[in-house]
Image: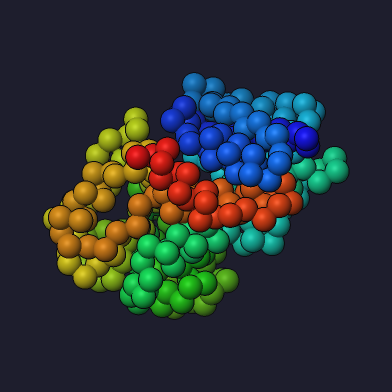
Amino acid sequence: MEKILVGLIGGGIGHSLAPALHEEEARHHGLRLHYQLVDLADHPGALAQVVGAMRHIGFAGFNVTYPFKQAVIALLDGLSEEARAIGAVNTVVREGGRLVGHNTDSPGWAWGFRRALPGADLTCVALLGAGGAGAACADAALRLGAERVLVHDVEAGRAHALAERLRAQFGAARAEAVADLKAALCAATGLIQATPVGMVGHPGTPIDVALLRRGMWVSEVVYVPLETALLSAARRAGCAVMDGGHMNVGQAAGAFRLFTGREPDAARMEAHFRRLAG
């Protein structure tokens, strides 16, 4: 039986369902896959050492999550076209002696969006968070036909940098950094929540939930817990919602394909994820 060693680097990832998700899908393909969590919550400065160790130990690849999706780029030997365009990496694959960064978050979010919110209005999308996850979601939304993405981040410089990258790729009128979050939400037909707020260890909501309104859709990237305070408030307000599990499964399926060369059954992975998360 073929053996594959992969993993995940992140901060505060003890609750991750990635090991069970990947290992179970591998079993269906007759593979023996071990998925190792490497939690650097208490040692964020050790990223370079950990990537170096994975390079030499023989990992076939690894995922990268918050807060390292952008910082890891400097430690890699190459990037896929998608990862370079987005400016963030969530999947690294060994190619011979090289570590090459990919981004499966963007197609993963798009996969989930089509399943959870078919026909949703993409006229104006408000994006909270301009980090790696936010950059991938914005890329996906624009590829799906979003007319305009309004980018907000607590670090204004990061919002402006992402908006500039999006404008260069998709057109000057299709992305804008905004400081006035209330005005952005009032104009938006949908909201993508791509910050850590709401996840285990980061409780609360990233916006005043009174700004949510019926007819607006809300997409959450946090999946632990699956039902965040924001999603609960959005449901009460009459919004259509997409929980973080959709993007998580979509990106995991893409990563599994890169790690193993096998075609995953995304629907089967989602059913397994829902059993684990439920």
Q: Is residue 232 left or right of residue 224?
A: left
In this orientation, does residue 1 appear?
yes
Q: Is residue 265 left or right of residue 112?
A: right
The quadrant in which the N terminus is found is top right
Toward the top, the furthest residue is: 42
Q: Position of residue 26 (x, y in %)?
A: 65, 41
Q: Is residue 28 left or right of residue 191?
A: right
Q: Position of residue 120 (x, y in %)?
A: 34, 72
For the point 35% across and 33% down, which residue is it? 200
Q: Nearer the viewer, residue 261 or 126?
A: 261
In this orientation, does residue 180 appear?
no
Q: Is residue 216 above or below residue 273?
A: below
For the point 78% across and 31% down, which residue is it? 58
Q: Position of residue 275 (x, y in %)?
A: 41, 41
For the point 58% across and 39% down, which residue is it? 24
The quadrant in which the C terminus is found is top left
Toward the right, the furthest residue is: 96
Q: Quadrant of residue 239?
A: bottom left
Q: Is residue 224 above or below residue 137?
A: above
Q: Quadrant of residue 276?
A: top left
Q: Is residue 110 above or below residue 207?
A: below
Q: How many numbered dots are placed on residues in this image?
A: 0
Q: Is residue 237 left or right of residue 261?
A: left
Q: How is the image coloured?
A: rainbow
Q: Position of residue 145 (x, y in %)?
A: 46, 76
Q: Nearer the viewer, residue 156 or 5?
A: 5
Q: Nearer the viewer, residue 95 or 152?
A: 95
Q: Is residue 13 above or below residue 278?
A: above
